[in-house]
Amino acid sequence: MDAIPKIEIFRDVEELMRRLSDTESGNFRPWRFDGYRWISFSDYHYFGSPAGPQGFQNNLAYYISSSVEPYAEDLKLILNIYNELESADAITTFIRLALRTYSILDLQPPQHLLTSISGNTELDHEDDVHFSHVRIVEAHIPSWRVIIETK
């Protein structure tokens, strides 16, 4: 990315990580180049009751990445649901944190964000500052993602 990010807080990766750390996500790993992209991710926030033989809990985490060091280009908020009996509570927690994330970024959430997440449907949104996506991944565990990309 050669242009300055239109999402203002993406221009200061350390400040972005600090503000997001004030949520339930905890601390971020150092901003580093992994050989492909500049990345950082938060601690996992575990919640709910353990499930399955391994006793995994539902969890949330942030991932930040960019093709260049000075700026963030995208932010992902990811929910992994291990305890499907508590999926409604997990989705409520995810929605609450997604809305708080948009507030931290000083962005309006997409109009259909809540219905997309709660209705288990994907979403693509674009405005003059950013792209937003909701993705649902049905792998070995259900996973929801809110992806915010700057223009």
Image (tube, rainbow, N blue to C red):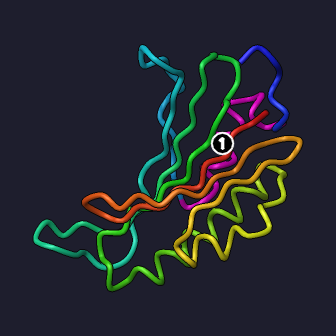
> With 67 as the anchor, is 151 left or right in this view?
right
The location of residue 44, given as percent across then percent down, is 41, 54
- The quarter of the image holding the N terminus is top right
Q: 14 and 131: which one is in front?
A: 131
As displayed, is residue 43 above or below residue 23?
A: above
| Residue drawn where x is 41% and y is 79% of the image | 87
Q: Badge 1 local density, few (<14 within 10 Å), some, or many (20+)?
A: few
Tell me which segment is drawn in magenta: 8-24
| Residue drawn where x is 70% and y is 24% of the image | 71
- Residue at the extreme left: 53
Q: Which residue is mark 1?
A: 18
Q: Is residue 49 magenta?
A: no
Q: Quadrant of residue 57?
A: bottom left
- The quarter of the image holding the C terminus is top right
The location of residue 47, given as percent across then percent down, is 40, 71
The location of residue 98, given as percent across then percent down, is 64, 62
Q: Is residue 13 magenta?
A: yes
> With 35 as the anchor, is 105 left or right in this view?
right
| Residue drawn where x is 25% and y is 60% of the image | 140
Q: What amino acid type is highlighted by mark number 1?
A: Arg
Q: 2 and 20: which one is in front?
A: 2
> With 129 as the anchor, is 84 left or right in this view?
left
| Residue drawn where x is 64% and y is 52% of the image | 133
